[in-house]
Amino acid sequence: MKFKTAILDEAAVRRALSRISYEIIERSDLGRVLLVGIKTRGVPLAEIIKTNIAGITGTALPVCELDITHFRDDVAEKVEVKGEGLAVCPEGRDVILVDDVLFTGRTTRAAIEAVLSSGRARTIRLAVLVDRGHRELPIRADFVGKNVPTSMKEEVVVSIAPVDGETSVSIYEK
């Protein structure tokens, strides 16, 4: 891949996550919210949102990590689902899935299926740092840090410090 352009630096990512945090506060009953970070980069993003909300409201939201590998529809062979599901039961909760990039919608579909396999959530909403378009499924994000129109020849690369050692969002040519 060839580097094309930087979209967000660390400060811009912090601002986008702060805006998402405020939107969640404004549009949610925080007593019911369960943040669910989709592995890999959705997990630290969910933790940042949790920290932001706690700093603003004093409310500590629960955060769960979700591995959707076994729920994907693009895996060649069926894999037996292992593990205990979510650490917190989503039954009756307002689940907010957190991911880095929304593209085709297939990861989100798999995440919804994974959440529902752990219990019936009251609602499921989606927070993403970047929405790049090109949906294959009728899925939209409820909370978006930045909309980035892209071509199919481009890839959006999100780097988050706890995983990658730096925080940024860039576009690369395939």
Image (spheres, helix red, strand yellow):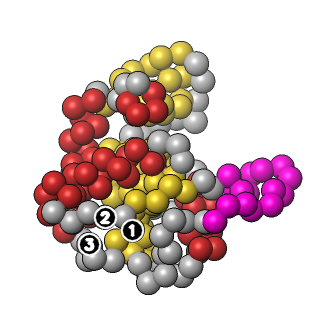
Tell me how far mark 3 sits from mark 1, CA to CA. 8 Å
At x 63%, y 65%, the residue is 84
Q: CA distance from mark 2 to mark 3?
A: 7 Å
Q: Residue at x 49, y 81 (%)?
A: 91
Q: Is residue 134 visible?
A: no
- The quadrant where residue 98 appears: bottom left
Residue 114 spot, x, y in % from top left: 61, 66
Residue at 46% in and 59% down:
64
Q: Is residue 45 above or below residue 29?
A: above
Helix, strand or loop for disc 3: loop
Q: Is residue 163 magenta?
A: no
Residue at mark 3: 30
Residue type, numbered disc 1: Leu
Q: Which residue occupies the foreground of this view, 33 or 146?
A: 33
Q: Which corner quadrant holds the C terminus?
A: top right
- Provide the residue span drawn in magenta: 69-84
Residue type pointed to by label 2:
Leu
Q: Look at the numbered disc 2 and give the secondary structure of its residue.
A: loop
For label 2, the residue is 61
* Residues at marks 2 and 1 touching, judged by CB atoms closer than 8 Å: yes
Question: What residue does disc 1 label?
Answer: 34
Residue 83 part of the magenta segment: yes
Kindly identify the amino acid type of the residue bearing the numbered disc 3: Leu
Q: Earlier in the sequence, mark 2 or mark 1?
A: 1
